[in-house]
Amino acid sequence: MTETDAPSFGAGSTALEVIEGVDLSGKTALVTGASSGIGVETARALMAAGAHVTLAVRDTKAGERTAAELQASTGNSNVRVVHLDLADLATVRALASAWSGPLHLLINNAGIMHTPELRTADGWEMQFAVNHLGHFALANALLPALTEAGNARIAVVSSSGHGSSGIRFDDPFFVRDAYDRGLAYGQSKTANVLFALEATSRWAERGITAAALMPGGIWTNLQRHWDPEVLADMKRRFPTKTPEQGAATSLFVATRAILGPGTPVYYEDCHPAEVVDEITDGVHGVVPHALDETAARRLWELSESLLADEASRPAEPELPT
């Protein structure tokens, strides 16, 4: 079922409403960050449609609790939990090397937001590393499985926060400039959209398509680093979605949207977003710098170079015990 024959959905739709009538029996899905927030509801809807779902999480104990609850609520026992820390590419490689069979749906859902200045072991700014580079590495490592599926889709959870910054190609990790948590987040969310654009361009011939999405204003643990007064003001000023509603656009992109070269690459409220010069209401629209094909190619090449450098570094020796 695609956009042309699907029911009408909008900001108030839930993930279970979007997935109703979709049969994912025999299909495999992997959801990152699936032990909290909209990740749980994304996995729940996929399982309700019959998919075999892998929850890729940092905290596997939380993941196991989530898996048990999802089994109980959906009646689908085809769920498993794997460890994934997007800031640690060794866990990305371990997940991919252990994967067997096709992967039909990859939901790049995990993310961090407005963190203090943090860096990975490689010196990469943490928001760019987790939100973009870790997911970039994961999709590339799982490319054989996505190709095997024949018609795989990648749904990438971005944000209207992309409007605050394009890719800072001259200083992506804030080595030269003072760290700005808002710009760092915005850059990482722009990277999500550019990844989806370039992934479709490069991989459509393999049967793999991608799109990014804005889930909406959902107040979850994602905002734990915000100033409490700012967060309270945002909750008063902007429309709020439940996690069930926030997951709806992920499901729409994953199962109903028409994807491919030349089609919309950024969705909100279960429909393509309008291209705008500026996101004036803090929520709606996609800005041109997130749709720039030249920037998308340049980001892909930069990301490949960074991952190659990381892979070539010698492992630190283990300390004697």
Image (tube, rainbow, N blue to C red):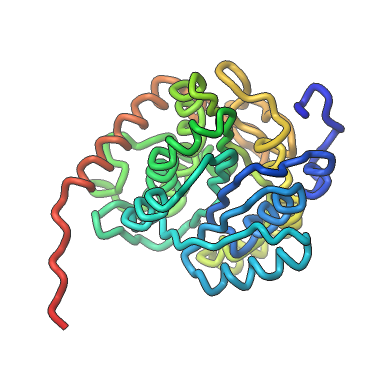
Q: Residue at x 64, y 37 (%)?
A: 280
Q: Is residue 158 visible?
A: no
Indicate left or right for 160 with 143 as reference. Answer: right
Q: Nearer the viewer, residue 58 or 298?
A: 58
**Image mark count:** 0
Q: Is residue 193 above or below residue 262?
A: below
Q: Is residue 79 above or below residue 144?
A: below
Q: Nearer the viewer, residue 114 or 37?
A: 37
Q: Residue at x 34, y 26 (%)?
A: 298
Q: Residue furthest right?
A: 7
Q: Residue furthest top?
A: 262
Q: Is residue 88 visible?
A: yes
Q: Residue at x 86, y 32 (%)?
A: 7
Indicate left or right for 213 with 257 as reference. Answer: left
Quadrant (top left, top right, bottom left, bottom right) of the N terminus: top right
Where residue 91 appears, as percent x and y from the top left, is 37, 57
Where residue 214 appears, as percent x and y from the top left, is 63, 42
Quadrant (top left, top right, bottom left, bottom right) of the C terminus: bottom left
Where residue 71 appears, as percent x and y from the top left, is 72, 64
Indicate left or right for 179 with 33 as reference. Answer: left
Q: Is residue 224 above or below residue 101?
A: below
Q: Residue at x 67, y 70 (%)?
A: 68
Where residue 30 appears, as percent x and y from the top left, is 56, 49
